[in-house]
Image (cartoon, helix red, strand yellow):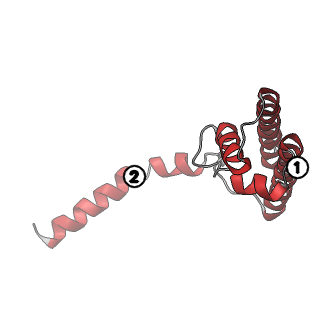
């Protein structure tokens, strides 16, 4: 290949890509676009309040301390059933099984927490 043909290939590639560029640039920002700092701070504060409320509620249900509940909480990003893992970890930590009523209350508190987190994310996203 000659140097001239290399430049011709590059020029052809650029020309072929040009019609695509305006359509890509004209698209509105999607849900993956970054939030402004104020919305990010607001979401962080709301998330912290929601998580603190959940921890306090589980501590009340189980009769233990919030610190023990926090230690027993699994990493939400890696666990699909975080409430079930939390219940198992608390039972291990407390050395006794939770009652069916306690389990049901924790599952209900977890559903409430997830709903509150979803609403906070929607509010922060401005949707």
Can you see residue 127?
Answer: no
The residue drawn where x is 65% and y is 45% is: 30
In this picture, residue 71 sits left or right of residue 79: right
Residue 37: x and y, percent?
A: 79, 64
Q: Earlier in the sequence, mark 1 or mark 2?
A: 2
Choose top left, top right, bottom left or bottom right for residue 31.
Answer: top right
Q: Please name which of the two marks, 1 or 2, marks the residue nearer to the observer.
A: 1
Which type of secondary structure does the marked residue at label 2 adopt? helix
| Quadrant for the N terminus in the image | bottom left
Can you see residue 65?
Answer: yes
Name of the residue lying farthest toward the front = 95
In the figure, 61 relative to 41: above or below? above
Name of the residue lying farthest toward the left = 1
**Neighbours of disc 2 within 10 Å: few (<14), some (14-19), many (20+):** few
The residue drawn where x is 81% and y is 52% is: 47
Residue 103: x and y, percent?
A: 76, 32
In this picture, residue 44 sits left or right of residue 7: right
- Residue at which label 2 appears: 17
Which type of secondary structure does the marked residue at label 1 adopt? helix
Compare residues 41 and 53 and report the one nearer the observer: 53
In this picture, residue 88 sits left or right of residue 68: left
The residue drawn where x is 24% and y is 67% is: 7
**Marks 1 and 2: CB-CB under 8 Å?**
no
In this picture, residue 107 sits left or right of residue 2: right
Choose top left, top right, bottom left or bottom right for residue 97.
Answer: top right
Residue 19: x and y, percent?
A: 45, 47
Alpha carbons under labels 1 and 2: distance apart:
56 Å
- Residue at which label 1 appears: 56
Residue 105: x and y, percent?
A: 83, 32
Compare residues 37 and 77 and report the one nearer the observer: 77
| Quadrant for the C terminus in the image | top right
């Amino acid at each position: 290949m000659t140097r001239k043909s290399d430049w011709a290939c590059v020029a052809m590639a650029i020309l072929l890509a040009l019609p695509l560029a305006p359509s890509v640039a004209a698209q509105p920002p999607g849900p993956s676009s970054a939030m402004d700092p104020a919305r990010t701070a607001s979401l962080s504060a709301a998330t912290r309040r929601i998580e603190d409320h959940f921890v306090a509620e589980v501590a009340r249900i189980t009769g233990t301390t919030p610190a023990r509940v926090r230690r027993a909480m699994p990493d939400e990003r890696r666990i699909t059933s975080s409430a079930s893992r939390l219940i198992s970890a608390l039972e291990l930590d407390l050395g006794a099984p939770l009652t069916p009523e306690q389990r049901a209350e924790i599952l209900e508190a977890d559903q409430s927490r997830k709903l509150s987190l979803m609403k906070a994310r929607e509010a922060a996203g401005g949707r």
